[in-house]
Amino acid sequence: SSGKPNIHPPILHGFPGSNMWSALALGTLAALNGMGQVLDDWDPVEVVDERFKDLVDPGAKLTRVAWLENARTEGPAWVWQVGALSFTTGNCPTAGDWDDTYIIGNSTNGNASPMLRHSNHSNGQTIDFTGLGIVACETTGRRVSMVRVDEHSRFSARKTIVDNYRGKPLNSPNDVVIKSDGTVWFTDPSYGCIQFPDQECVLPGDVYRYDPKKGELSVVYTGLDKPNGLAFSLDEKRMYVVDSGAMHADFDPTRPHCVYEFDVEGEGAGCALTNRRLFADITPGIPDGLKLDNFGNVYVAAGDGVQVFDPEGTLLGKIHTPPYPSSFAHLTPGYGQCSNLETGGAPGTPPFPHYRRHVFYIAAGPGVYAITLKSSGGDRPMPPSQV
């Protein structure tokens, strides 16, 4: 379809209400409307709680910004310094042997283009504080790595951040976030050893904290079945962690498919996640990646798209993603399992500071989709001058 989505101008909550910011918002909307394919025949927004209407327009439409046949898109990450979106294509075996990192931006004329061939089946990604460094979880590389891009969104360098714990290889790092103090927090389930039998996992599936200044890797939590997506609360005093143990070699609904909430306690290598409690049980399918907006609402990748919860765990609404062929499509009839999420601007727009984001990206099977939110991404603390 060539129609335009029914999207109202976003409300930039908490930001200066000047004409400059209104113009920036409208410019980004125009850029979003001009890229990809608007899915006019798909109604993605399901309102469960009336408050959801404050976060997304009920009539908003998805724009498909990328479609790679047989790929399993993952790890969307907003490279804000150059106004580009990066994502991975094959964290597990796929029919097309996908294993590349793609990017969409000015340098690609708004199209998805390979940025890094052979990404070691990278999974979740996040961006460092320079806005040019992509921190990636490599399934078969069994490491967390840094991929740097230049001002033209092209690959420039790659290095290992961490690949072992006390001399033992990591299992298959899955998802990653960076705390405001620069420490790197990531999950390390055994999925890679299930999906790629040549790999042997010798570590429990833990949640880790890496201090790049000291070169120290420490376990902050052990005891989850398959730790997956993770995100800090806005004040970084709490952390949300997905346990997707229900998806093992096969789907087993008796195993975890939920999001846990923890307190973040301690300092340095003594940091730990404590006081585990259930935040949300996710069905259909499994929970995967997580994001927060600037109200602290939690967006969870799920079997029917994105499920959105308030900070107390009340379901507000859903953003549904279309179905696609897969070995677990029967678990989510009528919808497509979503893998991961990101907030940013529209590819090709002038770069935005990382704390001003109102385009919401959804990786789901072969597709990457975008929808405009009224709330802005809050997965980074805002600088004091902007609070």
Image (spheres, rainbow, N blue to C red):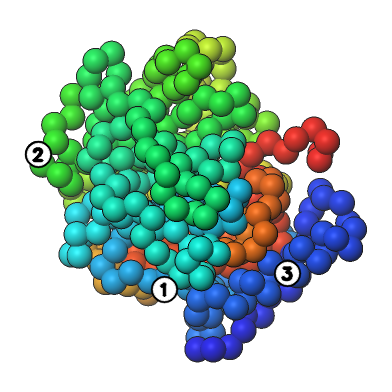
Observer-nearest residue: 56 or 333? 56
Q: N-terminal of the two: label 2 or label 1?
A: 2
How far is disc 3 from disc 2 in space, using C-alphas?
Answer: 49 Å
Please tell me which residue is depicted at 20% across the width and 65% down the height of the picture: 96
Which tag, 3 or 2, sits closer to the chain's start?
3
* Image depth: mark 3 or mark 1 in front: 3
Q: Is residue 85 left or right of residue 218?
A: right
Residue 349, by quadrant, is bottom right
Q: Is residue 249 visible?
A: yes
Dot 1 amino acid type: Pro
In this rendered view, identify the residue nearer to me: 103 or 26. 103
Q: x, y percentage for residue 4?
A: 62, 84
Of helix, strand and loop, which one carries label 1? loop
Q: Position of residue 159 (x, y in %)?
A: 36, 33
Q: Which residue is mark 3?
A: 27
Give the total number of marks visible in the rendering: 3
The residue at which mark 2 appears reads as 198
Give neighbour class at mark 2: few <14, some 14-19, many 20+ (Cα, 10 Å).
few
| Residue 44 coordinates in the image, percent (x, y) | 53, 73
Label of residue 322 in the image? 1
Q: Residue at x 75, y 64 (%)?
A: 25
Say left or right for 61 vs 300: right
Q: What secondary structure is marked by label 3?
A: helix
Distance from label 2 to label 1 (Cα)?
33 Å
Q: Amino acid at mark 3?
A: Gly
Q: Secondary structure at mark 2?
A: loop
Q: Nearer the viewer, mark 2 or mark 1?
A: 2
**Do the residues bearing badges 3 and 2 touch, measured as CB atoms within 8 Å?**
no
What amino acid is at disc 2?
Asp
Q: What's the residue at 14%, 36% (across, down)?
A: 199
Residue 258 at what x, y percent from top left? 42, 44
Quadrant into which the C terminus falls:
top right
